Image (spheres, helix red, strand yellow):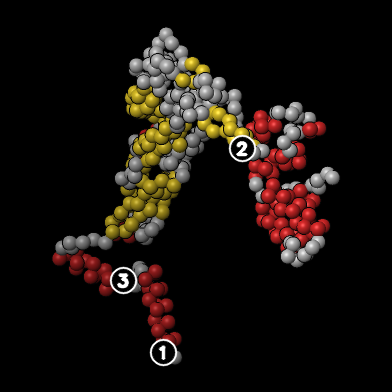
């Protein structure tokens, strides 16, 4: 009698997740459990069928095999009419696991060649350098291909030999029940090759450690936290494998005057009380190396912001620039002389609400608030 489809047995769709499988199994197992159906041979057979279906589908590897080959995946005689030859089952199963889970892969190694690791380099620059852009040279200690053996790891004049244990596959297989399990070859450690006479310079590794000088182009307008990738400038690969990449993580040193937000620059400038009251002007530096003049209107208050259009950071890959924003802080005078005190006292006695509209309005509202509380 032909077996029923396992998904049909559990009453679930083929894309059912683990939670749906478990829920369906519990329901069916409770329905056909022998304790609930004593002496019922048909219920006992259904209970066994439900358990077999769940045992297969709850295991990711078994489920993948079942989805591809059905019940034939677990028959000792091979795939029968499934299109595969008898005796090819274990090899095909290895291909399945390689496809779905990254296992297996016998015969797919690249003669022990391994890609080198990626490297990280932290580079700090000034805000002026980020504004102008520049080319900097960095010293990077890294592994490079051994010149003596050209990366093979074998003594010059010799070459690595194919591993006899795994036949160059880098993995060995062992049958276990219905499955063939693969593990890393213990002789060559997965490289597929062995070196009988290693290179005396690199000790058979195929690479040596050196300090290299690299030029890094810093584009104008680059931002803090930018990552620059130098392809192939990382650690050399093992036994002639490709090199990794070098990633440069850029940070911009805090500036004495400016704070940056995107392409805009911000600067705080203290001005005297008299300049704020009477009006005036002052000069501010720019990252272009020149100064710009800011005119202060009469009656300027602390927090007033002035905009210098186009005096900010350049925008990468464009001809545009951000703006510079100057925020003024009115400084209260200290260490007054006797005459200065007299003048300020005279000014205060003759001042009115029109001279201090903000404070006058505030204290007027405070008085109204207190009066309302008393009513």
Q: Is residue 50 left or right of residue 208?
A: right
On residue 42, the disc is none
Q: Which secondary structure, mark 1?
A: helix
**Image quadrant where one finds the C terminus:** bottom left
Q: How much space separates mark 3 and mark 2, taking CA atoms?
A: 100 Å
The residue indicated by pointer 1 is: 374
The residue nearer to you, when weighing 269 against 313, is: 313
The residue indicated by pointer 3 is: 351
Question: Quick one: which residue is furthest to the front in this view?
Answer: 39
Question: Quick one: which residue is furthest to the top in this view?
Answer: 157
Residue 181 appears in which quarter of the rendering?
Answer: top right
**Image quadrant where one finds the N terminus:** top right
Instruction: Name the residue: 74% across, 33% down.
Output: 78
> Mark 1 or mark 3, which is nearer to you?
1
Q: Earlier in the sequence, mark 3 or mark 2?
A: 2
The residue nearer to you, when weighing 228 against 270, is: 228
Residue 103 appears in which quarter of the rendering?
Answer: top right
The residue indicated by pointer 2 is: 176
């Amino acid at each position: 009698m032909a077996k029923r489809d396992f998904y049909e047995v559990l009453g679930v769709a083929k894309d059912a997740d683990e939670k749906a499988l478990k829920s369906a199994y519990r329901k069916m197992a409770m329905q056909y459990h022998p304790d609930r159906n004593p002496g019922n041979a048909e219920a006992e057979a259904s209970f066994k069928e439900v358990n077999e279906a769940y045992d297969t589908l709850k295991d990711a590897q078994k489920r993948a095999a079942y989805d591809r080959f059905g019940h034939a995946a677990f028959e000792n005689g091979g795939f029968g009419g499934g299109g595969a030859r008898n005796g090819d089952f274990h090899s095909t199963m290895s291909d399945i696991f390689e496809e779905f889970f990254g296992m297996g892969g016998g015969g797919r190694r690249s003669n022990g060649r391994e890609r080198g690791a990626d490297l990280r380099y932290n580079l700090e620059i000034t805000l002026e350098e980020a504004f102008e852009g520049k080319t900097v040279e960095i010293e990077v200690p890294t592994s490079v291909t051994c010149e003596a053996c050209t990366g093979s790891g074998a003594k010059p004049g010799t070459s690595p030999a194919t591993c006899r244990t795994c036949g160059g596959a880098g993995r060995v297989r062992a049958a276990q029940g219905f499955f063939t399990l693969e593990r890393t070859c213990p002789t060559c450690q997965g490289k597929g090759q062995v070196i009988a006479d290693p290179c005396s310079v690199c000790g058979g590794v195929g690479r040596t450690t050196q300090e290299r000088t690299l030029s890094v182009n810093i584009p104008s307008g680059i931002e803090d936290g930018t990552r620059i990738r130098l392809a192939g400038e990382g650690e050399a690969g093992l036994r002639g494998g490709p090199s990794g990449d070098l990633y440069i993580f850029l940070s911009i040193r805090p500036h004495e005057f400016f704070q940056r937000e995107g392409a805009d620059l911000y600067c705080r400038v203290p001005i005297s009380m008299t300049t704020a009251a009477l009006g005036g002007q002052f000069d501010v530096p720019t990252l272009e190396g020149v100064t710009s003049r800011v005119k202060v209107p009469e009656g300027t208050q602390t927090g007033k912001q002035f905009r210098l259009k186009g005096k900010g950071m350049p925008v990468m890959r464009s001809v545009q620039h951000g703006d510079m924003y100057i925020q003024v802080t009115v400084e209260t005078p200290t260490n007054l002389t006797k005459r200065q005190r007299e003048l300020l006292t005279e000014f205060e006695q003759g001042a009115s609400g029109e001279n201090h509209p903000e404070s006058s309005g505030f204290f007027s509202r405070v008085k109204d608030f207190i009066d309302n509380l008393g009513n």
